[in-house]
Amino acid sequence: MTDTLPSLDQIEEMARHTVDGLPAPFRGAAMQVAICVVDWPDTDMLRELEIDDPLDLTGLYDGIPMTEKSVFDQPMGPDTVWLFREPILDEWRERGDVTVADLVAHVTIHEFAHHFGWSDDDIAAIDRWWE
């Protein structure tokens, strides 16, 4: 990586590349989830999750997990995976042992885990950090 930090668009591209690499049984459903990359989580998100430091939130799944969805659910909007650029970059700097792309993939997988209702074993099969 150069001295230039990745932009919001570049982080979104990394996340979409991660989704493209999901196993076929999950890829189609994952592509129905919106991916939104912003610099910081908003105040309402932090308050709702009772998080004081915005650097503690690198990603968030906003929606109803597939394991809990019902035909009676009235969607208020698309299921969304939020990625927060500044907290991701802060964790990347602190870790110093992974690439930004690997960290973005890690956060993306974990947010989609909430969407799919995956177990730790399911996550480990895709995200090698859990082995």
Image: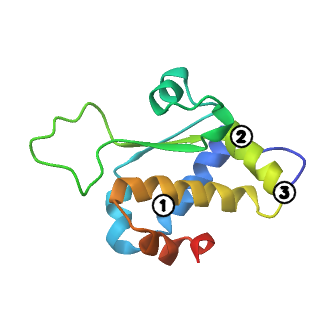
At x 33%, y 62%, the residue is 28
Q: How would you rate the neighbour count of disc 3 (Cα within 10 Å): few for under 14, some for 14-19, many for 20 or more?
A: few
Q: Sequence order check: which comes first, mark 1 or mark 2?
A: 2
**Percent from the top left, x then y, of residue 78?**
32, 39
Mark 1 and mark 3 residues within 8 Å of each other at the beta carbon: no
Q: Nearer the viewer, residue 83 or 121?
A: 121
**Percent from the top left, x then y, of residue 74?**
16, 35
Badge 2 is on which residue? 7
- Amino acid type of disc 1? Val
Badge 1 is on which residue? 19
- Amino acid type of disc 3? Met
**Percent from the top left, x then y, of residue 36?**
51, 39
Residue 68 appears left or right of 41: left
Q: Nearer the viewer, residue 122 or 34?
A: 122
Badge 3 is on which residue? 1
Q: How would you rate the neighbour count of disc 1 (Cα within 10 Å): few for under 14, some for 14-19, many for 20 or more?
A: many
Q: How would you rate the neighbour count of disc 2 (Cα within 10 Å): few for under 14, some for 14-19, many for 20 or more?
A: few
- Amino acid type of disc 2? Ser
Residue 97 appears left or right of 71: right
**Percent from the top left, x then y, of residue 49?**
48, 33
At x 64%, y 32%, the residue is 54
Label 3 sits on a secondary structure element that is loop
| Residue 116, quarter of picture | bottom left
Q: How far apart are marks 1 and 3 (CA)?
A: 22 Å
At x 57%, y 30%, the residue is 41
Describe the colour scheme in one phrase. rainbow
Q: Compared with residue 114, is residue 5 higher up or lower down, i.e. above or below?
A: above
